[in-house]
Image: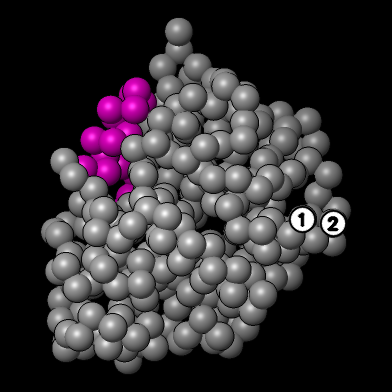
Amino acid sequence: MKENTKLDDKRIKGIVQERYSQIAKQNSSCCGQSESCCGPSDMAEHIGKAIGYGEEELQSVPENANLGLGCGNPVALATLKEGETVLDLGAGAGFDCFLAAKRVGDKGKVIGIDMTKEMVEKAKENARKGQYENVEFRLGEIENLPMETESVDVIISNCVINLSPDKRRVFQEAFRVLKPGGRLMVSDLVLLKELPESIRESVQAYTGCIAGAMKRDDYLDLIKNSGFQELDVQGEEFFSLGLESEDAMAKAIAEEADIPIEQLNEIAHSVLSIKIGAIKPKK
């Protein structure tokens, strides 16, 4: 099993930080949009509905918390309980954190981790506006979590791990910080077949959540090999958002990779949105 390492890890992180810093400042979507990163303000809501969020969920969070960056709804699948401590890997502007906060209640706690300073600042401001006293945001990398060992009950993540150049480390860290018996719930993008090299090395495709994606079985193996058990694929479907031929991001990827736009339509049929649950075994 071999992860895509064509792009230098340090460069990848720099590219991702820069792009998501721009997204935070613009209050707009980039991953799976049907316009551009500067698209209309209602695009995030459209994307949210398309990937499984209900109208009530979309309307219950602070304005600008939902930037349309996800590929699924991990909170709906995480069976969160009152009083639990939840960790969100790659929290962005805090959308999933705020939904989780309502489920764990005042006795629970939600911690969001993001490596982009602007996103963390935006999330903190959203928390202040929404008066979420049980939500905290920390600046940090999901490969090196600023968390104590065995300190959380549930970990959620939504279309973020595909952006990491070291996914093995991400799952190892997730395993470390979960309490024995703790639950992992991930929504992410995976591949049915390898991407062409020109796409794997495309900056546009990487920040668009495509180039960093792993093959489905390799991704599942990483989770298992990190120590998780009871692996459960709770849903998977083709993820076409952002790869249609008329899409601005698709055009940008095709231009950078120097491939026909029609080839991207074929690639879209090898990209899956997957929802995965797993358990850290009890001692």
Which of the 4 image quadrants contains residue 226? top left
Q: Is residue 265 visible?
A: no
**Image height check: is 106 above or below 150?**
below
Quadrant for the N terminus in the image: top left
Q: The disc labelled 2 sits on which kind of residue?
A: Arg
Residue of label 2: 128
Measured as percent of width and height from the top left, residue 267 is found at: 19, 72
Apparent side of residue 217 relative to residue 187 in the rendered image (left or right): left
Q: Which residue is mark 1?
A: 124
Whether tag 1 and tag 2 are in contact, CB under 8 A, the answer is yes
Q: 43 or 149, which is in the foreground? A: 149
Label 1 sits on a secondary structure element that is helix
The image position of residue 83, as x and y in percent, is: 71, 29
Q: Is residue 151 left or right of residue 209?
A: right
Rendered location of residue 213, percent (x, y): 30, 57
For residue 18: magenta? no
Report the magenta residues as a range. 217-240
Q: In percent of the image, x 27 and y 43: which residue is there?
A: 219
Task: Please report the residue visible at 16 percent of the width from the left and 88 percent of the height from the top.
Answer: 260
> Residue placed at 64% from the left, 70% from the top?
24
- 113 in relation to 23, above or below: above
Question: Can residue 34 be seen from the camera position used here?
Answer: yes
* Kind of residue sitting beneath label 1: Lys
Seen in the picture, residue 171 relative to 12 is either above or below; the reply is above
Which marked residue is nearer to the observer: mark 1 or mark 2? 1
Quarter of the rendering occupied by the C terminus: top left
The single residue placed furthest to the bottom in the displayed view is: 246
Q: Residue at x 60, y 82 (%)?
A: 42
Locate residue 7, reporting x and y percent. 30, 61
Callout 1: few (<14), some (14-19), or many (20+) C-alpha neighbours within 10 Å? Answer: many
Residue 61 occupies quadrant:
bottom right
| CA separation in Å, label 1 and label 2 | 6 Å
